[in-house]
Amino acid sequence: MEKITLKVNGMSCGHCVKSIEGSVGELQGVKSVKVHLEAGNVDVEFSPTEVSLSKIKETIDDRGYDVE
């Protein structure tokens, strides 16, 4: 398992948290997702053999948020 922290812009409310945690959490190979709204960060624990970092970023981006 690999753990990363992504800087995500555009998150402002509980809906943002649910949207990101729900969509990324459904990806095969993602073990855990935790959004830190105030810090603008998303912690993801995932298996790089099952899901790529670019797929995780793309999933967040598709929800309308900007991943740095």
Image (tube, grey):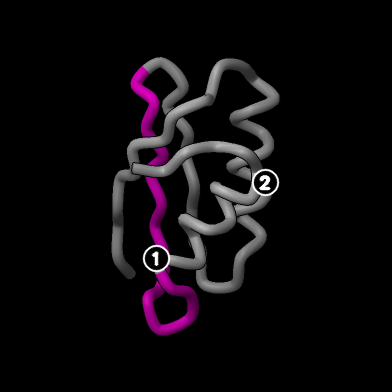
Task: Say whether residue 43 is magenta.
Answer: yes
**35 or 32, nearer to the observer:** 35
Query: Of all residues shown, which one is farthest toward the bottom?
Result: 49
**Residue 7 percent location from the top left of the image:** 34, 37
Residue range of the region highlighted in magenta in the rendering: 39-52
Q: Is residue 33 above or below residue 26?
A: above
- Tell me the residue at 50%/67% (across/down): 55
**Residue 31 percent location from the top left of the image:** 49, 61
The disc at residue 53 is 1
Q: Are marks 2 and 1 in contact (CB under 8 Å)?
A: no
Q: Quadrant of the C terminus?
A: top left
Q: Amino acid at mark 2?
A: Gly
Q: Secondary structure at mark 1?
A: helix
Q: Is residue 33 above or below residue 28?
A: above
Tell me how far mark 2 sits from mark 1, CA to CA.
Answer: 17 Å
**Residue 62 percent location from the top left of the image:** 63, 50
Task: Say whether residue 18 is magenta.
Answer: no
The disc at residue 28 is none
Q: Amino acid at mark 1?
A: Leu
Q: Is residue 33 above or below residue 14?
A: below
Q: Nearer the viewer, mark 2 or mark 1?
A: 1
- Tell me the residue at 39%/57% (across/down): 45
Q: Quadrant of the rendered structure where residue 41 is?
A: top left
Residue under label 2, please give it: 22
Q: Upstream in the sequence, badge 2 or badge 1? A: 2
**Residue 34 percent location from the top left of the image:** 47, 39
- Tell me the residue at 63%/28% (across/down): 16
